[in-house]
Amino acid sequence: MNLFSLLDQTALRYPDRGAVFRGLEQVQSWRDLRTRALSLAAGIRQRCTAGDRIALVSENRVEFPELLFAAWAAEATIVPINFKLHDKEVLQILEDADVSLVFASPKLLPDLSHTAAAHAERLVVIGEPDYLAMLSGKPLTPPTIDPQALAWLFYTSGTTGRSKGAMLSHRNLLAMTVAHLADIEALDAHCSQIHVAPMSHGSGMYMLSAVARGARQVVPASGAFDPAEFLDLCEVHPGCGAFLAPTMVQRLRLEAEAKRRAPPAHLRCIVYGGGPMYVEELRKSTAVLGPVFAQIYGQGEAPMTITGLDRASHVTDDDAILGSVGWPRSGVEVRVIDALGVQVPPGEVGEIVCRGDVVMSGYWRNPDATGQALQNGWLHTGDMGSFDAHGCLTLRDRSKDVVISGGSNIYPREVEEVLQTHPGVTRVSIVGRPDPEWGEVLVAFVVRTPGWVVTHEELDAHCLDHIARFKRPKEYRFVDELPTSNYGKVLKNELRKLLASAASS
């Protein structure tokens, strides 16, 4: 089954309903979107053959849906690339994927000089004459292809080295789509998906579930995440949902508080993921925006689909549930194992592994990395966690982030959760620093709440009120902001570099 069938079936059911919007303006109906995708697919097939890789380097645009579905109708593999990457990083991905065609946004072109020079014959600028010419041909007839065929080459962020391409098939992404509709959101044609997170990653992947149910696709006029604009759109479009990183949720909450806004009339669901959502922030955001939150835990290698916590599960006073990542998703088996690969009992911490139709087949042309990640049919996530007696999974940290101090394992996430409850702390991230006596000690990087003058001693006392003495950070560093990726994840490697630099100076 080809992913194009999701659009094909929706266009048949709802041909004249609005499909794609720029802000409040309807750009395409479902019939329009299908026709444009198939016309573009015909243009792609004139330049590529089945199985070729097609790159997409763009900020969020209304052309994103037609490009995704055109690639699949042309039996090609889409390679969406984070538009905030450096030109040389983009070029590295294009060369690794061995792409046949590159679609690029005109807005980004001035910063893609290396890419443009290396791929001049393959480069198509979205919306310009070459692109329009590809749209002018006779629409392609939708194909029937092997569901195991490669659909999406998902490149990791590359924050710890060269990016790796997770190979996701049509079957993988259909399993993700079905699980999302079964576990997280009951979408229909009266819903809207607002794309404020990058469409090259999570927001674009959730497009599949929305398209399958005829929910409209809304790209803000700004093409970016502006909290005020997002809230305004939720006052107009029906049944609004979005995928947001936790840092974006916080910005949304602060905007609503600052403007004393009531929860938007049509805000239906905010699915968050991609980084830790602290319980204190979740409670604050729920108080301001309403009970609209759902959580997913996944990786590019098992896209968006390992465990989850739906909206109903968020209506609880149980901090353990709110601080967890929920229960295994439909069609996914999840275990926690020790260093020998043996499943550990509830309450014990180990590495999280999973298997199911959603898990990638491997990394593109990287057998060594594939062999490390996929062992005996299980994806090894590199994340540490534990199940409770009811099968609810709690993340502890990435395996590389666990700090061993004086022979004891300390999970920074647990300490961050405690510090986050202090009213003088807006954000916090903790890393380990080598120590001659203890092996490692914890260092907390803290962003103060505006107007607060919080001290080391005050935070130390706060920790002692909540956790064991040995888990306290040995040092607090107050910073204006934390280094984050384009998706809102705190870059702990950058924090470690700061410590290493300070130690050597």
Image (cartoon, rainbow, N blue to C red):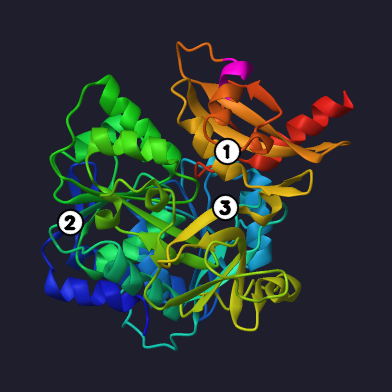
Q: Quadrant of the C terminus?
A: top right
Between disc 1 and disc 2, whose residue precedes? Answer: 2
Instruction: Give the residue displayed 67% in from the left and 56% down from the top.
Output: 399
Q: Position of residue 313 (x, y in %)?
A: 29, 56
Instruction: Give the residue displayed 57% in from the left and 37% down from the top.
Output: 467
Disc number placed over residue 191 in the picture, else none: 2
Q: Which residues are magenta?
A: 455-459
Residue at numbered disc 1? 415
Up the image or down, 361 lies above or below 55; here it is below
Element marked by disc 3: strand
Residue at numbered disc 3? 396
Q: Nearer the viewer, residue 494 or 409?
A: 409
Q: Estimate the spatial distance between the alpha carbons at disc 1 and disc 2, rounded to whole Å.
A: 39 Å
Q: Estimate the spatial distance between the alpha carbons at disc 2 and disc 3, rounded to whole Å.
A: 35 Å
Between disc 1 and disc 3, whose residue precedes? Answer: 3
Badge 1: few (under 14), some or many (20 or more) residues near its Cα, within 10 Å?
many
Instruction: Give the residue displayed 59% in from the left and 35% down from the top.
Output: 429
Drawn side of residue 40 relative to residue 34, left or right: right
Element marked by disc 1: helix
Disc number placed over residue 37 in the picture, else none: none
Q: Estimate the spatial distance between the alpha carbons at disc 1 and disc 3, rounded to whole Å.
A: 10 Å
Q: What's under tag 1, amino acid-wise? A: Val
Q: Quadrant of the N terminus?
A: bottom left
Q: What's under tag 2, amino acid-wise? A: Cys
Up the image or down, 214 lies above or below 260; here it is below
